Image (cartoon, rainbow, N blue to C red):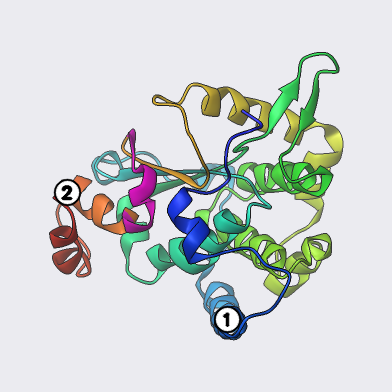
Amino acid sequence: MHNLLDKPPVLAVLYPLSNKMTAPNLLFTCVIVFFWTLLLSSFLHAIPAYPTDDSLIKVSATDSQKVNLSLYYDTLCPFCATFIVKNLTGVFYEDLINIINLRLVPWGNSYINKSSNGIVCQHGPDECILNILEACAIDVLQNVNKHYALIYCFEFLAIEGRQKDWKSCFTSLGLPKKPVLDCYISGNGTKLVQKYADETARLNPPHTFVPWVVVNNHPLQEEYQNFAAYICKAYKGNGAPEVCKSLVTQIN
């Protein structure tokens, strides 16, 4: 698995990696900074109070109609980070979040070295750390608004090459750092990513690049950037978001 591409071939043309800051890349960075400021403000006002164990929402008929959207990714894959920051965030602004179960699976092209039983990550040790931290965030901050906000912040820093500053995200978002770090230090986070490893290995068909997007067990493969249209097509409940009226015409 470790020799898989972390991007589909088409994206190698759309987003070439370079040590030089081209004009389009500079423009993209400026847009991202502006978008990041808006997103932080939105999340800070939209995140509800932490639920207690007694107030967890039970599965309802509406929940059973939701579309499962799963993202399998590497935390330091530039194409994964761009997808999370630039594309996937749209579900929170177009009411799609109300009709989906959003699942983030931070493992991607990592693998377990059979001789040492250690985890090897495609983009190095920093990626292993972030994979575990994001797995802990998902487990500890179960509200999707909260853990997505934190993961968005991590991935935004990754785009800028500042992934080592991940601790600043807790402060900027007002989220508790201790439970996530406790999960990481205790080794529970390692167990979580090992479960993600098993889940990723069972994908059928197997993933051939990341980001790998799956809608109701249907892998979108090269169509992954059109995920919103597939969500709308798969949703069979009432009250589909307004955006679905235009999106469903984009796919067969």
What residue is rendered at 14% in x and 54% in y?
238
Magenta stretch: dominant SS? helix
Q: CA distance from mark 1 to mark 2?
A: 31 Å
Q: Amino acid at mark 2?
A: Gly
The outermost residue toward the top is 115
Is residue 50 among what the camera can see? Answer: no
User: With respect to residue 23, does 235 lie above or below?
Assistant: above
Q: Which residues are magenta?
A: 217-226
> Where is residue 66 drawn, in percent x and y?
29, 45
Do labels 1 and 2 touch, CB within 8 Å? no
Tell which of 19 and 109 is nearer to you.
Answer: 19
Residue 198 falls within the magenta-colored stretch: no
From what the image shows, is residue 131 above or below residue 89? Answer: above
- Is disc 2 surrounded by few (<14), some (14 to 19) or many (20+) residues within 10 Å? some
Residue 41 shows which numbered tag?
1
- In the depicted structure, whether residue 37 falls above or below residue 80: below
Residue 203, by quadrant, is top left
> Is tag 1's residue or tag 2's residue first in the polypeptide sequence?
1
**59, 173: nearer the viewer:** 173
Q: In the picture, residue 188 is in which quadrant?
A: top right
**In the rendering, at what x and y percent does residue 204 appear?**
40, 24
Tell me the SS state at disc 2: loop
Residue kind at label 1, given as amino acid type: Ser
- What number is the disc on residue 237? 2
